[in-house]
Amino acid sequence: MGRLFAGPWMDVRGKVGNNVGRYVNGENIFAVKPHKSNKKPTLIQLNQQDVFGKVTSMVNGWKDLIAEGFRTGSSRQSPRNAAIEYNLEKAITGKAPNRVLDYSAFTFSRGSLPGAQNVKVINSLDDPYFLTFTWSKDSNDSEAKDTDFINFMIHCPSTGRNTKLIKVVERSALTLEMPIPFDYSGKQIECYVNFMSTDGLKVSDSQYAGSLLKV
């Protein structure tokens, strides 16, 4: 059902018969509802579907962090859509039909809070089902508070699964042992962190901690 927000020919959102109203780049568009094509998709189309699906999967897996990390202040674009748009532009590399997701460039948070120095992740030396994260504090940055929380995110491309730990330790801890699912063993995983102020009003840019084979 479509909703009319202004005059009879303005600002129609949703389905109206065989038409759909929506906003595109700040303009109200009222067009025929798209139909599924019977044509076989081209390699370029398949490639676009693949990269779009991977970005969307990661964003959906971290929707609570995305909500904090991509506050848009706009009623016309949700944090989820802002994150998808940003990563499709910044985290996709190569030329069609060989475009791929650059995991090191993927971002789930953008903010003014300072990050960390020397963020690293390795397989735990004590337990095969743990990872060891370490980081350093920039002692010269007064905005980097010891009490800031740090969040940890892991993505496993081969399974499409996401694992996270939210606000479990403070910036001053400088290390964390993170448990991971058993089915990550023998698979490549991508690891990320970001910081959040104690009041939750500020976040840092997310940081790529590295890629490793979980042994």
Image (cartoon, grey):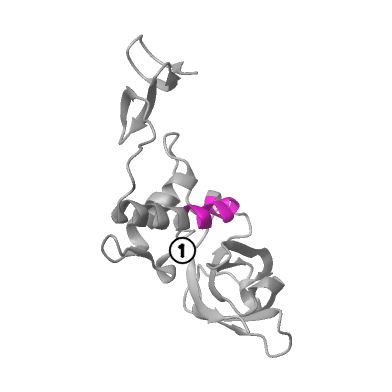
Q: Nearer the viewer, residue 180 or 183?
A: 183
Q: Nearer the viewer, residue 140 or 58?
A: 58
Tell me: 189 left or right of 101. right
**Residue 55 within the magenta-colored segment of the rendering:** no
Residue numbers of the magenta segment: 56-66
- Vertical placement of 68 versus 147: above or below? above
Q: Give the residue at the far bottom of this rendering.
A: 125
Q: Is residue 180 visible?
A: no
Amino acid type indicated by mark 1: Asp
Q: Give the residue at the far right of this rendering.
A: 127
Q: Residue at x 38, y 50 (%)?
A: 85
- Vertical placement of 76 versus 46: above or below? above
| Percent x, y of residue 102 | 39, 68
Disc 1 marks which residue?
205
**Magenta stretch prevailing secondary structure:** helix
* Quadrant occupied by the C terminus: bottom right
| Percent x, y of residue 214 | 61, 81
Element assignment for label 1 = loop
